[in-house]
Image (cartoon, coloured by chain):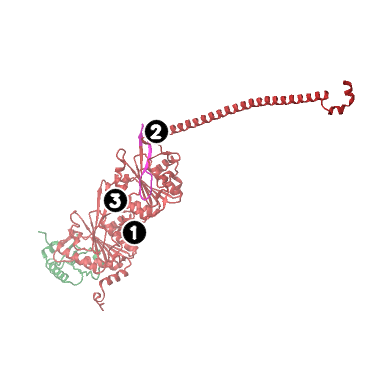
Amino acid sequence: MAPPPPTRRRSPGATMKQMAQKKKSSQPSSKTLPKASTGIQGLDEITGGGLPHGRPTLVCGGAGSGKTLFGLEFLVQGATQYSEPGVFISFEESIPDLTKNVASLGFDLDRLVADKKLFLDHVSIARSEIEETGAYDLDGLFIRIADAVQRVGARRVVVDTIETVFAELPNPGILRAEIRRLFGWLKQKGLTTLITAERDQPDRLTRHGIEEFVSDCVILLDHRIREEISTRRLRIVKYRGSIHGTNEYPFLIDEQGISVLPISSLGLDHAAPAVRISSGIARLDGMLGGKGFYQGSSILVSGSSGTGKTSIAAHFVDAACRRGERCLFFAFEESPRQIVRNMRSIGIDLEPWVRKELLQFQAARPTYGGIEQHLLVTHRCIASFHPSVVVVDPITNLLMVSTQNEVRSMLTRLVDFLKTQGITAIFTSLTAGGGTLEASEADVSSLMDTWLLLKSIEVAGERNRALYVLKSRGMEHSNQIREFLLTDDGLRLLDVYLGPEGVLTGSARVSQEVREKAAGTSRRQELESRRRELERKRRIFEARMVMLRAEFEAEEERIQQNISESELLGEELLQDRTLMVRSRKADASSYQKEGRAQGARVR
Amino acid sequence: MAGQTPKSIRAFANLKALCEEHLKDRYQIEVIDLMENPQLARGDQIVAIPTLVRSLPQPVRKIIGDLSNSVRALVGLDLRKAD
């Protein structure tokens, strides 16, 4: 009994939705187009969910661009991750060759075949043994594919590459008609199909115009060598019914298969945390509004050779590790051991953090791979290590393997990614000595929230180190050019000395220090002598006082003496008179006392 | 062949006629219907239908089509030199 035609009763949208809900791997990312997840890292994000479900997708590209691998990974992921068995029809490579080629990518085709999750069929057509004698069709191929699909219950099919039939079989007219019929048949069976085709010239997608049969989705793979480094790019040329990124996306093929570099945010909607963290150098924090960097911000430290960029990064890392946070250090110039040794000379020991697995070094010369390689490795390391701090030292080395534009593009992606993860990042940048330090960084610096510029100040035959905060978004910061030293005890910012020409550094500062000290000393000495003067005067004054008093006392005594002598004399005189009076009996009283006898005598 | 289609029927008829004419009593025709035995398509690497596989003498030749072009068919079977 045939089921009633669905379109009359229900709307197409509902039918699609039902279909979508039944399939585990398809995601109804848009209301009308269910998609089959590829499982290829990064691709599902770009395509908004994967390839169109139940329809053919064309993957074209030049020789060696990765089409076969793309198809195989699509099937392997489908079989292992989404429980969708698959069929691979290979027109070019034999099955043993295929198996061997992808073994290094971690795909065990033999096992998948044995588990009936995958069916591999090699269609070998040798033109030399063929003679065309009349009308024919490709039913043989159809039967083989149908049989393969039925054997494993496949939901995914890859045909690599259908164009071979044009090379091996005569009569393109028949072939084109048959190919159209094949795609129709695959669509009817609801099989998500991937067709590969070779692109031989830049002005067309495929050699034989296969794209006219596959109109739902076309992906272009590109593999080029630039400056001796191979770079791979993927572009979605067409995806009917779906919003997709239209740019070229770099991708890599390595031991984890294909990885398309993820775009973490097409918009700019990262959070903006307000937490501040120390730079590891107290006085530098002082220059940064007193509190240090914003968490999750991007910091550029630029300067010419030997100015101390890595040292600043090392201080930051040291401080972070002390707080128990993990740090990831990407070293593009020096080996990790060298960095550890060099930092020890300024009193920072990074070795214990490495041992405690709080600090991880990732070192590679940039020429080791293309820029995408680096971006990918960076992403992978961050995804597995989960650091809260990342250092890239230096970013300018990446220019060795790429153009300015590409480096900027890569850094944009990286900074974006780090911000969405809330990771604080320091990027060091080497500026060629001579040119204006600020101009050469203009490109990259706009990505950065904070920019510390390290300078060598040449004056009077010396070079002294100085730094200043060129910008720091969202905070007050110092605009002072500060001299600093790299001592055994770390980086030390010195006090600022201003002379008539501005900031003094080096020996000019030292001599200014000495001068000021000398001036201080002489002032003190001046004060001292004045005090002594005062003391002396006081003593003189006091001595005079003593003398005056002595004089006065002597005088006093003399006068006193006089007075008492006078008094005495007065008394004596009085006494004498009294005596005389008495003896002369002048006073009656004396008669009475002495009697008459006396008086008789005298007559 | 893959099921009884006009092309296959024609091919068989043409083949029979050719063999009778050029290889009387020295041939053997085996008809394989791939609809019934699809795995044989794989084994013999059959893509086009109908295909005539001449297994002997070596080398193996695959003659595709309904054999309506008897000249080409004979060339394919090595019964006639290619012009």
Tell me whether marks 1 and 3 sit on the same chain. yes
Tell me how far mark 1 sits from mark 3, CA to CA. 36 Å
Q: Which residue is mark 1?
A: A108
Earlier-in-chain disc, 3 versus 2: 3
- Please identify the quarter of the rendering in which residue A106 is found: bottom left
The type of residue carrying mark 1 is Asp
Q: Which residues are magenta?
A: A457-479
Residue A313: horizontal and vertical position, in percent? 39, 45
> In red, which chain?
A
Residue B15 left/right relative to A386: left
Query: For this view, does A304 lie left or right of residue A559?
Result: left
The structure residue drawn at horizontal position 36% and vertical position 33%, both measured from the top left corner, is A459
The residue singled out by tag 3 in the image is: A409
* Dot 2 amino acid type: Ala
Disc 1 or 3, which lies upstream in sequence?
A: 1
- Main SS, magenta region, reads strand
Q: Chain of mark 2?
A: A
Q: Name the foreground residue: A303 vs A198.
A: A303
- Residue farthest to the front? A603
In this rendering, does residue A147 appear at all? yes
Image chain in green: B
Number of the front mark, 3 or 2: 2
Identify which residue, A176 or A349, lies in the foreground.
A349
Tell which subunit mark 1 falls on: A
